[in-house]
Amino acid sequence: MKRLLIAAAIGFASLAAHAADIGISAKETYAKIQQAEQNVLFLDVRDPVEIMFVGSTDAAHANVPFMLVDRTQWNAERGVFRLYRNPDFINQVKLELARRGLSADAEIITLCRSGSERGKPSADFLRENGFPNARYVIHGFQGDAIKEGPQAGFRLQNGWQNSGLPWSPKMSPEKIHRVDRP
């Protein structure tokens, strides 16, 4: 019994050792994509409407929203529309992996606006659902807001946009999540 417990502990430790750290910088992500690493899937997990107004990077392989906006339900307390988890998120991620010939062990890197509201939660959710190397871009696409001064509140530090990485105010129609096609 003692040997079985030791073997199980070693097995769990080795699994943890193989999983990548969950956070990754925008520049590290871009370097992986530029090296054309074969075992990486880079996903923008924002709602397509947000991408339409904020911009995106063509370095992302696809847009698979983690949270979607329900424009029929208004949250008066927060002053926003209700967000809900995309019920097809896991299946859509599996489809993107299959399109590239990748397995569930591939490194899946998610990108949202700031990294905290959908990036990390989507990576955690993927890990909980059998994707051990899911990660997220720290500070997301827009980065953190400046705290003081005349530009206080604007997201002008760190993140993809503020790291000198390529991005565009226009969406890629081939990569954006659309309900009018599979």
Image (cartoon, grey):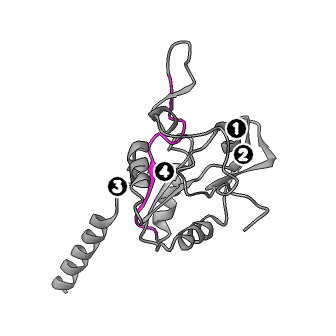
Circle 2 or circle 4, nearest the eye: 2
Q: Which residue is tagged 3?
A: 21
Q: Left or right? Give the position of 161 relative to 73.
A: left
Q: Are there few (<14), some (14-19), or many (20+) residues within 10 Å of tag 3?
A: few
Three-letter amino acid code at the position of disc 4: Lys
Three-letter amino acid code at the position of disc 1: Phe
Q: Residue at x 50, y 74 (%)?
A: 101
Q: Earlier in the sequence, mark 4 or mark 3?
A: 3
Q: Is residue 5 magenta?
A: no
> Residue 56 or 130: which is nearer the viewer?
56
> Residue 3 or 155: which is nearer the viewer?
155
Q: Are there few (<14), some (14-19), or many (20+) residues within 10 Å of tag 2?
A: some
Tell me the distance, in whole angstroms, between the alpha carbons under discs 2 and 1: 7 Å
Q: Which labelled disc corresponds to residue 49?
A: 2
Instruction: State which quadrant residue 79 falls in.
Output: top right
Q: Which residue is tagged 1?
A: 53
Q: Quadrant of the C terminus?
A: bottom right
Three-letter amino acid code at the position of disc 3: Asp
Tell me the distance, in whole angstroms, between the alpha carbons under discs 4 and 3: 12 Å
Q: Which residue is tagged 4?
A: 120
Circle 3 or circle 1, nearest the eye: 1
Q: Earlier in the sequence, mark 3 or mark 1?
A: 3
